[in-house]
Image (tube, rainbow, N blue to C red):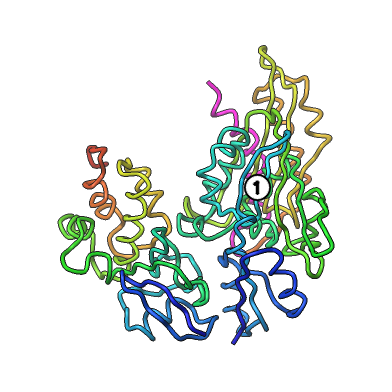
Amino acid sequence: MSEVFLPATLAGLFPIMEQNPDAVLLAGGTDLLVRIRASGTRPQAIIGLERIVSLREISMNDGTIRIGAMATHQHLLDSGIIKSCIPVLHQAVSALGSPQIRHMGTIGGNICTASPAGDTLPPLYLLDACLELTSKAGIRTIPISGFIAGPGLNTLQKNEILSAVLIPARVHGTGYYRKVGQRRSLAIAVISMAALVMTDPDGIITGFRFAFGSVGPTVMRFPDLESELVGKRFADEALSEAGKEAARRIMPITDIRASAEYRRMVAETLLLSIREELP
Amino acid sequence: MKIRCTINGEQRDLSAAPDRRVVDLLREDLGLCGTKESCGSGECGSCTILVNGESRLSCLMIAAQLEGAEILTIEGFAPDHLHPIQEAFIRHGAIQCGFCTPGMVLAAADLLSRNPSPDRDEIRQGLSGNLCRCTGYQKIVDAVASLSGKQEEPDE
C-alpha cells in the first residue's frame, strides 16, 4: 500500500516531500496510475498536488501568460486567455485524450511525463514557454527545451515541483496543430506538428516556426529551415520544400503505433496541410 | 484511512486504503456494480463517474482523492425513475450488451450540462472517451441528439 498525501498549500507540501524521498508526484494520474498498475509495484508514497489551489490559476500580467501547472486540460479549454492569446495551445489540448482525460490530466503532468507524443509540447516549444520550478529554497525558471531531457525524462530536482508555465503574451502568429493517430479520438500521436505563421498583406512569410512531436526523443525543431521560409510566399512550393527536408532530418522509430517510414511520409505532408485552412 | 464524501446524494464515512482504486471501492466495497471496468487504463470510459459534476475515470482515481468530493454513479443518477438520457437510450435502441451504457449515459450527462445543444459532431467528441463494441455508435449519437436543443436530421 502507498501512503497518500494531498497537501493544501505549498508550505505544507515541501516537508512531506522531504520526509518521503521516494514518493511520486500525482498531477492528474492519467499516466502515473496506469504506470503504477502496469509495474505491479507500489510507490512508498503518492503526493497529490490537486488541492493546492494556487497551482491552478491561469492569469496574464506584465506581458506574461502564467498557467498554473495543476490547471487541467479542461481549465485550459475554458480559459479565455488561452483561447484568444495562444490558440495553438488550445487546439492541441482539444486534440488531447478524451473529455474524461481532459478533466483529470494537467498541463504540468503532460510536461513532466515528457512523452515524445505529449500533445502540449510542440506548441509550448514554439511559444517560447519557460517553466517555473519551485522548491523550499525558492523559484527558478528554465526554457521548456532545457527541462525535457529525453523520452520520459525531465530535469526536475529532488524536492522540487513544476509550479507554472510562463508564456510571453505577444503576437505569435496564426497557429496550427496537426495530429495523426491510429484513430480520430483518444489517440496517442503517431506524429504531431504545431506551426506558427506570420505573413504580410502580400502573402509573404515574415515569421515561421514549426515543431514535430513523436518523431524523435523529444520535440524536434529546425531553426534553419524556419528562417529559410521567411521572405518566401506562403504557398505550397516553399512548404513542400521545407517539409521534404524536415522529413529527412527527423529521427522517427518504428513502434507499436507506426513504422519510421510512415512517420517520415506523413511528416512531409503535414507542413503542406496547413495550407488547407487558407481562404 | 477514513474518507468522508457524498456518494449518490448520501454522506458517507468510508474506510479504505488510501491508494485503493475508486472503481474497486465502488464495486467491491460498496456494491455499486453499475460502474464497470474494462481497460483499467483510461481508454474505454466504462468506469466513468461524475465527481463534483464532472466526468472522470474511476479506474484512474484513488480513494484518498474522494475526501470532500461529491460522487455520482449510475445508481444515483436517477434513483426513482429513468432519467431522460436513459429513456432516450432505450427509445433509440442505443443499448445492446449494456456494458458501456452507464459510462455512456454519464458522459452524455456531462456533455449536455456543458453544452445543452450539441450537434452530432460535438456529441461524437463528447462521447469520444467511451467505447461501445456493439452498436456502432450511430444509435447512441441518435439518442443524445434527440435531447439536444439543436435538432437536426440524423446523418445517413
Q: Vertically, is A11 above or below A129? A: below
Q: Is residue B59 visible?
A: yes
Measuring from the top left, give residue A93's x and y in whole percent: 56, 47
Question: Residue at the spot x=71%, y=17% of the render?
Answer: A204
Magenta residues, as a range? A256-279
| Residue A274 located within the stretch drawn in magenta | yes
Question: Residue at the spot x=31%, y=69% of the render?
Answer: B9
Question: Residue at the spot x=56%, y=24% of the render?
Answer: A278
Q: A123 or B131, which lies in front?
A: A123
Measuring from the top left, give residue A132's x and y in whole percent: 76, 52
Measuring from the top left, give residue A15's x and y in whole percent: 74, 74
- Chain of the residue under label 1: A
Q: A140 or A32, which lies in front?
A: A140
Quadrant of the image containing the N terminus of chain A: bottom right
**How many numbered circles are shown?**
1
Horizontal side, residue B55 vs residue A10: left or right? left
Question: Residue at the spot x=17%, y=63% of the render?
Answer: B82
Q: Amino acid at mark 1?
A: Ile
Return the residue at label 1: A67
Name the quadrant containing residue A79. Answer: top right
Q: Is residue B156 visible?
A: no
Q: A272 or B15, which lies in front?
A: B15
Q: B81 or A89, which lies in front?
A: B81
Please tell me how crowded label 1 is: few (under 14), some (14-19), or many (20+) other residues with Cα within 10 Å. Answer: many
| Residue B71 located within the stretch drawn in magenta | no
Q: Vertically, is A223 above or below A249? A: above
Q: Main secondary structure of the magenta part?
A: helix
Horizontal side, residue B90 vs residue A221: left or right? left
Q: Vertically, is A131 above or below A149? A: above
Which secondary structure lies at badge 1? strand
